[in-house]
Image (cartoon, rainbow, N blue to C red):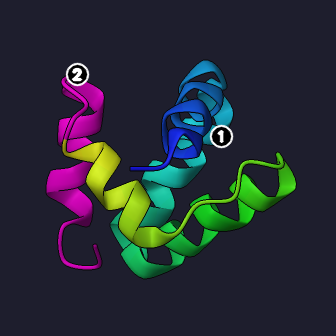
């Protein structure tokens, strides 16, 4: 698993606006949210694939992430 996914998650988690925007996008367009996460990774020089993000999210144990995954499951 890419270490970039963990670092990228930390950046997203530390930015409440970014986190909320991605959550909202996931509700309406889960695949688009994944594309946004990957694009943000490139922007932050932490490139990730959607598979790396999915794999990493399965290891995260916090309520917000679990809620996001439940809502976005269809596109992930």
Q: From the viewer's perspective, is residue 28 above or below residue 66? A: below
| Disc 1 crowd, CA 10 A, few/some/many (<14, 14-19, 20+) | some
Residue at image position (59%, 49%) is 21
Q: From the viewer's perspective, is residue 71 above or below residue 33? A: above
Residue at image position (38%, 73%) is 30
> Which structural element holds mark 2?
loop
The magenta span reads 59-76
Q: Position of residue 75 (x, y in %)?
A: 29, 79
The residue that disc 2 covers is: 62
> Which structural element holds mark 1?
helix
The residue that disc 1 covers is: 18
Q: Position of residue 52 (x, y in %)?
A: 41, 60
Is-magenta flag for residue 13? no
Q: From the viewer's perspective, is residue 64 above or below residue 14? A: below
Q: Is residue 66 left or right of residue 37?
A: left
Q: Quadrant of residue 47?
A: bottom right
Q: Quadrant of residue 70?
A: bottom left
């Amino acid at each position: 698993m890419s270490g970039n996914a963990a670092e990228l998650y930390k950046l997203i988690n530390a930015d409440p606006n970014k986190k909320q925007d991605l959550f909202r996008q996931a509700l309406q367009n889960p695949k688009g949210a994944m594309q946004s996460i990957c694009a943000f990774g490139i922007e932050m020089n932490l490139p990730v694939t959607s598979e790396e993000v999915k794999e990493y999210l399965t290891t995260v144990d916090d309520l917000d992430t679990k809620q996001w995954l439940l809502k976005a499951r269809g596109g992930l």
